[in-house]
Image (spheres, rainbow, N blue to C red):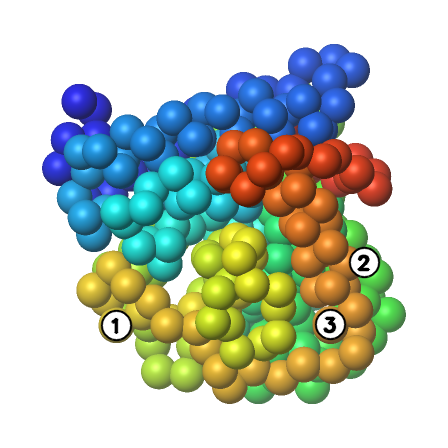
Amino acid sequence: GVFQDVDWALLIGAKPRGPGMERAALLDINGQIFADQGKALNAVASRNVKVLVVGNPCNTNALICLKNTPNIPAKNFHALTRLDENRAKCQIALKAGVFYDKVSNVTIWANHSTTQVPDFLNAKIDGRPVKEVIQDTKWLEEEFTMTVQKRGGVLIQKWGRSSAASTAVSIVDAIKSLVTPTPEGEWFSTGVYTTGNPYGIAEDIVFSMPCRSKGDGDYQLATDVSMDDFLWERIKKSEAELLAEKKCVAHLTGEGDAFCDLPEDTMLPGEN
């Protein structure tokens, strides 16, 4: 009954990983939660419900959820990567010595894990390409990327807990971006279903990509996006991880037997 006729569903709950628990086991335990929630949404939610998955691993949990909701468009499912985008904007603003709101078009590509790809190639500061303003390429390629990927862990070491307040703010930002028109020429990041994407990313996974909205709760993928080898190579690495996670949960998406062959542990520290 909790989902009866809802127009928005925020799926926040996921079991945190216990000591020594393999990522595969976590995918399975949490995946079952999201399969059940998907079935419940499918039964009673509004047919145009928008679903935002926060519980990690959120990309694959969103995929499991949408695979268990045949009556709801796959396009309506989102995995939260806005916290990563907000952190990336912050790092760029600090480095450039500008206010946070001067930074736009920062995309987080791919998975909400340490393989995520914060995109500085397309990002802008006051409308100018970041690479024109910050000419320290080494900082952009190494320190910036690593800082955004590992920010959650740093905060936990510092405060002894994960950043629930930042997550809450980013959930509000994510929804606000879908219910207010995106400013001309700008975009925001959210993890969405890849089928039909214009970038050449594998179909049938949930992947963070640059989106725009007319403010009606729906979105379109941005097409005026540049790509270079540095960016593409990293996108492919995170894509491979998501394809491996998908195989790991095949038993929960109705796609046969699960096969787990996850290359390394990339869970974001503390956000798992």
Q: Quadrant of the N terminus?
A: top left
Q: CA distance from mark 3 to mark 2?
A: 15 Å
Q: Quadrant of the C terminus?
A: top right
| Secondary element at image label 2 | helix
Q: CA distance from mark 3 to mark 1?
A: 28 Å
| Secondary element at image label 1 | loop
Residue sitting nearer the eye, 13 or 104 = 13
Query: What amino acid is labelled 2 in the image?
Result: Glu
Q: CA distance from mark 2 to mark 1?
A: 35 Å
Give the residue drawn at x 71%, y 28%: 23
Quarter holding residue 229: bottom right
Q: Of the residues tagged 3 and 2, which is closer to the observer? A: 3
Q: Does residue 149 appear anywhere in the picture?
A: no
Return the residue at label 3. Answer: 231
Query: What amino acid is labelled 1 in the image?
Result: Lys
Return the residue at label 1. Answer: 214
Return the residue at label 2. Answer: 143
Q: Of the residues tagged 2 and 1, which is closer to the observer? A: 1
Q: Which mark is first along the chain, 1 or 3?
A: 1
Give the residue drawn at x 39%, y 38%: 68
- The mark found on residue 203 in the picture is none
